[in-house]
Amino acid sequence: MNGIEKNQTLKDVYRLMSELWCSPSETNVTDIKKDAKEVIKKLEYINKEAAILFRKFLEENTISDESYIDLFELDPKCSLYLGSHSYDEPKTCAGAGVSDRNKYMIELRAIYKHFRKIADEKELPDYLPLMIDFLSLTLESKMIQ
């Protein structure tokens, strides 16, 4: 497997992971698992342990809409918005414009724009699936070089 094929495989892994972190009602798990079988075969040539772990993750990744909402969305136990783990929410609306999290969001959006990554406008820039999908761009830049 050459470098371009390795990078494409890793890019496919990032794409599948980002799709799996989305709401179950928004994803076609059957198609994802079908695509994943091919990707895992290729991943075994790059990193056998990663392929085993990814396969295990896919086998165990069954979550209902209700559990997903309870865990990640409404008063989340584990937010998929990474900035919420690092920055405190502003206490007032006036504080939102000058908060550290706001600066973080602006910087993330600028990074996406710089790399011509069009962020999903209905999601904040620190949404985990969006950030995982963005990782695939690092592999694209390696393929170009």
Image: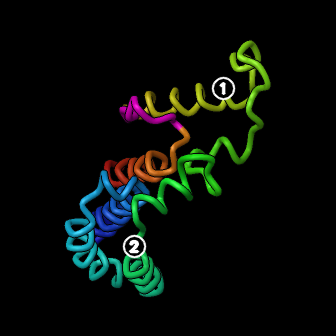
Nearest the viewer among 66 and 129 is: 66
Labels 2 and 1 touching (C-beta < 8 A)? no
Residue lying at the far front of the rendered structure: 66
Figure quadrant of the N terminus = bottom left
Query: Is 125 located above or below residue 9 in the figure?
Result: above
* Type of amino acid at the residue the image marks with label 1: Asn
Which quadrant of the view contains residue 47?
A: bottom left
Query: Where is residue 38 shown, x and y percent of the image?
Result: 22, 76
Name which quarter of the figure residue 77 lies in. bottom right
Q: What's the colour scheme?
A: rainbow
Task: Measure the alpha-carbon separation of dots 2 and 1.
Answer: 34 Å
State which region is magenta: 117-125
Q: Earlier in the sequence, mark 2 or mark 1?
A: 2
| Residue appearing at x 45%, y 51% in the figure | 129
**Label placed on residue 123:** none
Q: Which amino acid does label 2 sit on?
A: Thr
Q: Mark 2 points at which residue?
A: 62
Residue 55: horizontal and vertical position, in percent? 38, 82
Q: Is residue 61 left or right of residue 102?
A: left
Q: Residue 102 carries which label?
A: 1
Measuring from the top left, give residue 53's x and y in whole percent: 46, 82
Using the image, determine if residue 63 lies above or below residue 82: below
Residue toward you, 143 or 17: 17
Pointer 2: residues within 10 angstroms few (<14), some, or many (20+)? few
Q: Residue at x 49, y 63 (%)?
A: 67
Q: Which residue is drawn at 28% across and 73% down?
A: 36
